[in-house]
Image (cartoon, grey):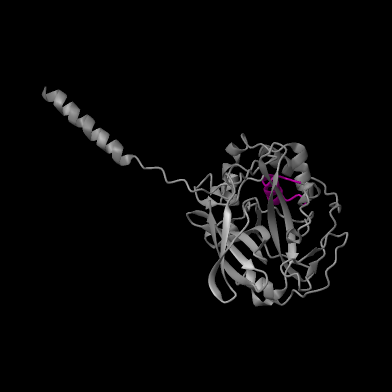
Amino acid sequence: PASSSARGEAEEDAGEGAAQEEIPAPPQEPLAPFAGRCGVCGKVTEFRCSRCHAAFYCCRAHQRQAWPSHRLECTPNEHPFLYRPPEGEKRIVVATPMNHQNNAVLDAAAFHIGMAVRVKFGFPNWAGEIGTVEKVVQPHKGPDGRIKVRVGARAVAIPARELEVLDGACPPAALGTAAPVEASTSAQGSVENPLHAGDKPAVIALPAAGEAAAEVAVSSENLAVLVDMGFDEDSARRALQRHNNDVNPAANWLLQGGVEDNDQETQAGEDANFGMALFHDVEEGDGQDGTGADLSSNSSCLYSTTTIISGHRFRIETVREGHPSGVGIRLQATRLDDGQAAELVVRE
């Protein structure tokens, strides 16, 4: 009896030790489809594998670290994002000062929050014009009835005063290089700034979509390195030709999907807010640029629509804001008559 009692106490102690060692799983934030957790360190990030769009990485180093195992399950995904609209319709109530009456409530018409996500990932300089390069994620209804998302890219040259508003950290020297000029649309794919219809927009001329890169002799040694990483020979050869036989950028390009510039789908539409699509020298940014992996300072507009409420035109936007714990979305509206901000409440 004494030995059985000691054995029972030992089992109880072991059970308590196991209970103490058990660590509860962290709560799952509603990150999809805009962000996820790095497959290596678990950090919240919005950068993902551009080939399968399923694995997230906070930096290129972690993507490369995980690639030997990830490449076994990484397959191209033609429709990487799915956005399902909310069940039923949401009504938006706009409260804004009007006719000297504070907090006058205006009922908006039933309104779907269809959104175009613009993720700003650079301030490049083309021909002396400072602008932004953005990824545009535009929902559209597929043949099966589901809302799918088309991904493209756009660039806009922004006058200095507006660039300063968009990014207060932009250096003053850069702000002085953008000058408004006459708007024009050329075969080169010029794009205009749609932020203020009354201003003369700044325009940047971009290389033509069909320009072909000069033929580059491929090093057999570098080709073997890429093939050993798991890429097929044709893709590896094309990547080396594209990047002048430099293995590192060629590997990064392949890890980011290896899409030819002229295969990117255009995003130019009737709405001027979407600008013109770019076809040349645009880095997709889906990849793993560690400089933008910190979500704490990241925010972008999810443009929805301009609507008329009680005879006044309102621009209603959704704004995506990154936080260390996840991604939040809030609504805002601006009365276009006078630029007056409005308070939005979304009700079922």
Q: Quadrant of residue 344?
A: bottom right
Q: Is residue 295 visible?
A: no
Outermost residue to the top: 1
Q: Quarter-wise, where is residue 97 in the image? A: bottom right
Looking at the image, which residue is at 30% across and 36% down? 18
The answer to whether residue 340 is left or right of residue 21 is right
User: Of 12 and 346, which appears nearest the observer?
Assistant: 346
Residue 93: x, y in percent? 56, 60
**Where is residue 257 shown, x and y percent of the image?**
70, 45
The stretch in magenta equals 244-259
Residue placed farthest to the right in the image? Answer: 187
Q: In this orientation, does residue 10 appear?
A: yes
Q: In front here: 260 or 141?
A: 141
Magenta run includes residue 150: no
**Image location (x, y in percent) of residue 82:** 63, 43
Look at 67% across and 37% down and name the residue there.
228
